[in-house]
Image (tube, rainbow, N blue to C red):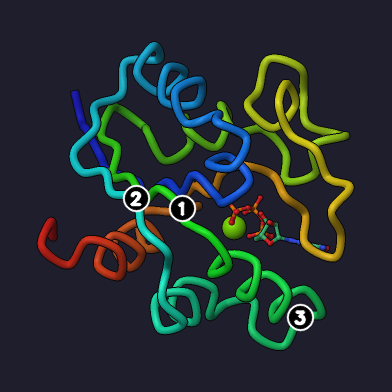
């Protein structure tokens, strides 16, 4: 079995709506392990690094401002094909089109535009996962 790691964020809307337990339950029920977990308010440096690929897009600044406005929970999860698997659990970016059964489809709301408040982030490739884990948990490696 080949295991891999991914970086998950429970965004401020998940913390504010007390959905941490519900989302963690889904991650653990799927069989993924929790390698590291920390709740804190993200720094501007962490967020500009994390969202570098979106710099210049219209939602970039509101996204970075929103993500730094209140505590979030950063998680390193581990398991077989966890990168793709967690993105399947999360569902499509936009909660209205996310399938029922997914975190965003079941629980997400999107009416706080300009930033889509979709509860979670998950790395989208092994390269992104390595880069993002180094930002949020430099000690995990
Ligand atoms: P994520 O990175 O959070 O796992 O989500 P994703 O891959 O599905 O979406 P991505 O395109 O990477 O966008 C990152 C986050 O930016 C916010 N967003 N807002 N208002 C907008 O048009 C808009 N577009 C994106 C969302 O919070 C999205 O998850
Ligand atoms: Mg993304």
Mark 3 C-beta to ligand 1 under 8 Å: yes
Q: Above or below — where is 31 with respect to 4?
A: above
Give the residue number, with chain letter if any, for mark 3. 57
Determine the CA span between mark 1 and mark 2: 6 Å
Q: Is residue 118 left or right of residue 34?
A: right
Which residue sits at x=41%, y=25%? 24
Whether pointer 3 and pointer 1 mark residues with C-beta atoms closer than 8 Å, the reply is: no
Which residue sits at x=65%, y=67%? 66
Which residue sits at x=53%, y=69%? 68
Q: Above or below — where is 48 with respect to 116?
A: below
15 or 77, which is in the foreground?
A: 15
Q: Looking at the image, is mark 3 or mark 1 nearer the viewer?
A: 1
Toward which corner of the image does residue 95 lie, by quadrant?
A: top right
Determine the CA span between mark 3 and mark 1: 23 Å
Give the residue number, with chain letter if any, for mark 2. 39
Give whichever of discs 3 and 2 has the lower sequence position: 2
Q: Above or below — where is 83 with respect to 38?
A: above
Give the residue number, with chain letter if any, for mark 1. 72
Give how far across and how far down residue 13 sits, in percent: 63, 46
Q: Looking at the image, is mark 3 or mark 2 nearer the viewer?
A: 2
46 or 20, which is in the foreground?
A: 20
Whether pointer 3 and pointer 2 mark residues with C-beta atoms closer than 8 Å, the reply is: no
Give whichever of discs 1 and 2 has the lower sequence position: 2
Quadrant of the image for the C terminus? bottom left
């Amino acid at each position: 079995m080949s295991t891999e790691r991914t970086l998950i964020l429970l965004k401020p809307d998940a913390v504010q709506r007390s959905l941490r337990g519900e989302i963690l339950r889904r991650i653990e029920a799927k069989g993924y392990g929790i390698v590291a977990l920390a709740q804190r308010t993200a720094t501007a440096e962490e967020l500009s690094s994390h969202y570098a690929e979106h710099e210049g897009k219209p939602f970039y600044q509101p996204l970075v401002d929103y993500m730094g406005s209140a505590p979030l929970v950063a998680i390193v999860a581990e398991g077989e094909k966890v990168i793709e698997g967690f993105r399947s659990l999360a569902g499509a970016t936009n909660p209205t089109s996310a399938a029922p059964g997914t975190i965003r489809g079941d629980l997400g709301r999107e009416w706080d535009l300009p930033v889509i408040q979709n509860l979670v982030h998950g790395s989208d490739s092994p390269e992104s996962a390595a880069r993002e884990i180094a930002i949020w948990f430099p000690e995990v490696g």
